[in-house]
Amino acid sequence: MPRAIISPSVLASDFGQLTAECKRMIKGGAEWLHMDVMDGHFVPNITMGAPILSCVHKGVPGIFMDCHMMVAKPEQWVDDIADAGGSLYCFHIEATSDPVSLISTIHKRNMKAGVAISPDTPSTAITDEIANAADMLLVMTVYPGRGGQKFIERCVPKVAELRARFPEKDIEVDGGVGPKTIGVCADAGCNVIVAGTAIFGSENPTEVIQRLKDTVNAAQAQSG
């Protein structure tokens, strides 16, 4: 089973102090930073794009930017995100007709490739061919487009289905995840945890990050 990784979602951060917020999370034990890129087309919200990622990359040396591309044409932004210092490019399967070619394009730019599914998309949409080509699979536990939504528990079985098919793959959950909802996610087999409000809104983010990681490790030890 792949190791536990915590990826705080900067959507919940103070955008006016973005680099400082990222440094604060890394100091608190976060390995990745989850960057929500929204284009106003695939989702109704607009957040950040390559220019902001580029500034963060310069301001936070060595940062692993886990870029969640909630965009209508994911093929269009691969070069921009790579040039901005993106480490992982995670696109939505609902937004492309040729995911395998897109994964190849992402890899050519030396980024890891992730494939995301929204709450109404079944896990079977991720075929063996797609999953084997990708580095990470993302199961959304809220509808993409807004931070601070309530966790949708009916999405959790999709994590278990994907973990059963791909025991060594990084599987990420994103949406409404925090100390109260991490247990079911960890038990289902996810190892990469995106949490926004639960971490950034906490008085002690270091403690929350550690608790999320400990819960994943405990679930893995039990299942192993």
Image (spheres, rainbow, N blue to C red):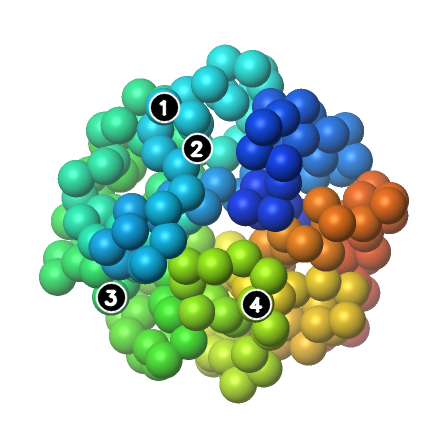
What is the spatial separation of the Cα atoms under label 3 and label 2, in whole angstroms? 22 Å
Look at label 4 and name its amino acid: Gln
Callout 4: SS? loop
Q: Against 55, is 13 above or below?
A: below
* 89 and 216: which is toward the camera: 89
Residue contact at pointers 4 and 3, CB within 8 angstroms? no
- Counting from the top left corner in percent of width and height, residue 141 is at 52, 71
Q: Which mark is residue 149?
A: 4
* 117 and 166: which is toward the camera: 117
Q: Which label lies toward us, 3 or 2?
A: 3
Callout 2: SS? loop
Q: Name the residue beneath numbered marker 1.
A: 51
Task: Answer few, some or many: residues within 10 Å of disc 3's Cα (few below 14, many 20 plus, some between 14 and 19).
Answer: some
Q: Name the residue beneath numbered marker 2.
A: 87
Callout 3: SS? helix
Q: Name the residue beneath numbered marker 3.
A: 94
Q: Which label lies toward us, 2 or 4?
A: 4
Task: Answer few, some or many: residues within 10 Å of disc 2's Cα (few below 14, many 20 plus, some between 14 and 19).
Answer: many
Q: Is residue 32 visible?
A: no
- Counting from the top left corner in percent of width and height, residue 176 is at 61, 66
Look at label 1 and name its amino acid: Pro
Callout 1: SS? helix
Upstream in sequence: badge 4 or badge 1: 1
Residue contact at pointers 3 and 2, CB within 8 angstroms? no
Upstream in sequence: badge 3 or badge 2: 2
